[in-house]
Image (cartoon, rainbow, N blue to C red):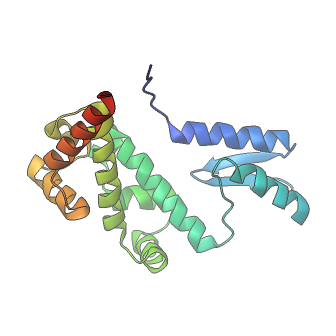
Amino acid sequence: MRINLKFDFNILSKKVLCQQLDAMGLQYTIQGLGEVEIEKMPDDISLKTIEEALCRYGIEIISDQQMALVQRIKDAITVLINDENNYKKYNVSTYLSEKLDYSYAYISNIFSETTYTSIENFVILKKIDIAKSHIVENHLTLTEIAYKLNYSSVAHLSAQFKKTTGLTPSTFQKIIKKRKERKMTP
């Protein structure tokens, strides 16, 4: 029997983080996306123990401030795109500036210097990943997916999908359907 699940990775990550920090007896405050303020900085040995405990769950401590900001940018974009209501009313640049409390020019510059791509390109890649997930898991129509991801039209979604993956969304759907059919036949 197969059970399909939907995860809220932000809630899941936060719970795992809290459990691990609580187990170590640390006094902390979760500041927001990817930021934790620890009241008393642990010594190097304790910090290494914390890193190892969190690493088991795919949580990594980032010491480089630029990389930390880039991760916060990526996390904020992910949250925005996954929140259908806010995504339709916010411009990405305005949202990031307000959320991270930096000018968009600064955020954009740091992101480009560190990742060698633009925020706009990252947004497109993220949207296409979500579109692929919707096609695979939710069986949504392309019109529904385009609406959810705030595309102006199905044609716009299709063009970006093809440019990013090399396949049209309908070809991608057919491939997924054939793979599922093969798994079902003995």
Q: Residue furthest bottom?
A: 113
Examine the rendering and report whether any part of residue 112 can be seen.
Answer: yes
Q: Residue at x 38, y 43 (%)?
A: 82
Quadrant of the drawing holding the N terminus: top left
Q: How many marks?
A: 0
Taking the image as shown, residue 117 lies to the left or right of residue 5, namely left
**Residue 57 image position (x, y, % from top left):** 66, 47
Looking at the image, is 128 positioned above or below residue 176? below
Q: Residue furthest top?
A: 1
Looking at the image, is 142 positioned above or below residue 113? above
Taking the image as shown, residue 25 lies to the left or right of residue 158, namely right
Quadrant of the drawing holding the C terminus: top left
Q: Residue at x 39, y 55 (%)?
A: 95
Q: Residue at x 77, y 55 (%)?
A: 52
**Residue 183 image position (x, y, % from top left):** 33, 33
**Residue 39 image position (x, y, % from top left):** 82, 53
Q: Quadrant of residue 35 in the image? A: bottom right
**Residue 133 image position (x, y, % from top left):** 33, 42
* Observer-nearest of 2 and 141: 2
